[in-house]
Image: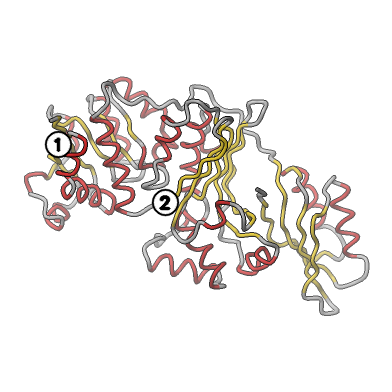
Amino acid sequence: MKKLKVAIMGLGTVGGGTYDVLTRNREVIKSGYGVDVEVVKILDKSPKRLADKGASEKLFAANIDEIVSDPDISVVVETMGGLEPAGSFIIKALESGKSVVTANKELLSKRLDELLSSADKGGSGLYIEASCVGGVPIIRTLTESMQANRVTELTGIINGTTNYILTKMSEEGDDYAYALGEAQKLGYAEFDPTADVEGFDAAYKLSILASLAFHTRIPLDKIYREGISKITSRDIAVGKSMGYELKLLAIGRQNSDGSVQARVHPAFVPASHPLASVRGSFNAVLLKGDFVDEIMLYGRGAGAHPTASAIVSDIVYCAGKDRPQKNDFGSKLANVSDDFPSEYYFSVSVLDRPGMLSVISGVLGSHGISISKMLQENADGHCAEVVILTHMTSERLFRAAVAELRDVDGVLSVGSEIRVIED
């Protein structure tokens, strides 16, 4: 029986969930995997949290040095979150030769090189399954199940908060502010929801996942990011009438020339698309390989126990490795394209007078953009709203066309601009 002594840094929601799994399922892990995992130190600001979990006060560590100086500890679990002091603590642990299991996607996406260098220096492993999509085993699928394939696309709903909000808006007709409030009441959204609703959280995860998928480094600042705070329930209703569901998507694609697309933004997907039926706080990732074609992973993307499940999986996985884990993020920076093709949904408010539809189509046509569908609504003799769905075009051409439309006499405003992803 292999014995593994573990320290946990941070006994909040995820750290507490990890402690629950390791203590309640200790015998299950022993009998199923031949590893006896024992929590021997817990670093937290509040000793009371240990008492609340029923943990012995003897486990309390007052500082990181108590952990890195203990030769019996071989794995350190970081569940503190944020950049500091988590970053400094992880580096100390790695450089002392202790493997680290972390769910900290922000830290990984912003300081990956520093962490990997520290792991090399200490001859230690860095295990990150819990950093992306909660309990869904996306990291190990990419690193250990796709070896026969060149992964060409990764498209996912990888933030449970935004998916819950958009589901409420779609199924119950709630406006954005009300749906966000409900998400906050349920604990899906923070008091300050910016990281989720403006797409930062999804961008952190996409930086990690796309780098692993394409074996080339995709920096966070190269990812196009757009959130859901400007989405209206009317946009969603009109999209549904056209046969679409609205989702916040993280998209990574490797083009034939080796360049990469990396973007996070709301998008309409057809009701028949596999991601269209992903509801509430659930997450899903659709992978495409050149030989396996499509694989979809689905499950709880956040929460104490799903994330803790992934952390404990990494602990057990680490115990079974003869050498530390080395994930292939690639050594070179990707050539990330800022001009990607898409179809577009957008609305234009115009004066209700003859010829406006032909003026709009003329501006789009001058930029090589053709119209798939056009609907005119709410005409009252003074103004009207035109909803347009384009055929495939480039980001650059679409932006130029919209800028010109805004200056057209008779155009009052250009409303929501939402990309459309077909099957």
Left-right relation of 17 to 385: left
Residue name at image x 64 percent, y 55 percent = 270
Sequence-earlier tag: 1 or 2: 1
Q: Amino acid at mark 1?
A: Asp
Q: Residue 326 location in percent, x, y? A: 37, 24
Q: Amino acid at mark 2?
A: Gly
| Mark 2 lies on residue | 299
Q: Is residue 327 above or below residue 153?
A: above
What's the mark number on residue 36?
1
Q: Residue 294 location in percent, x, y? A: 55, 40
**Mark 1 falls on what kind of element?**
strand
Of the pair 295 and 50, the residue shown nearer to us = 295
Q: Answer whether labels 1 and 2 touch (C-beta < 8 Å).
A: no
**Mark 2 falls on what kind of element?**
strand
Left-right relation of 255 to 295: right
Tell me the quarter of the image containing the N terminus: top left
What's the mark number on residue 7?
none
Q: Residue 22 location in percent, x, y? A: 19, 45
Q: Is residue 334 above or below residue 310?
A: above
Residue name at image x 32 percent, y 25 percent = 118
Of the pair 22 and 121, the residue shown nearer to us = 22
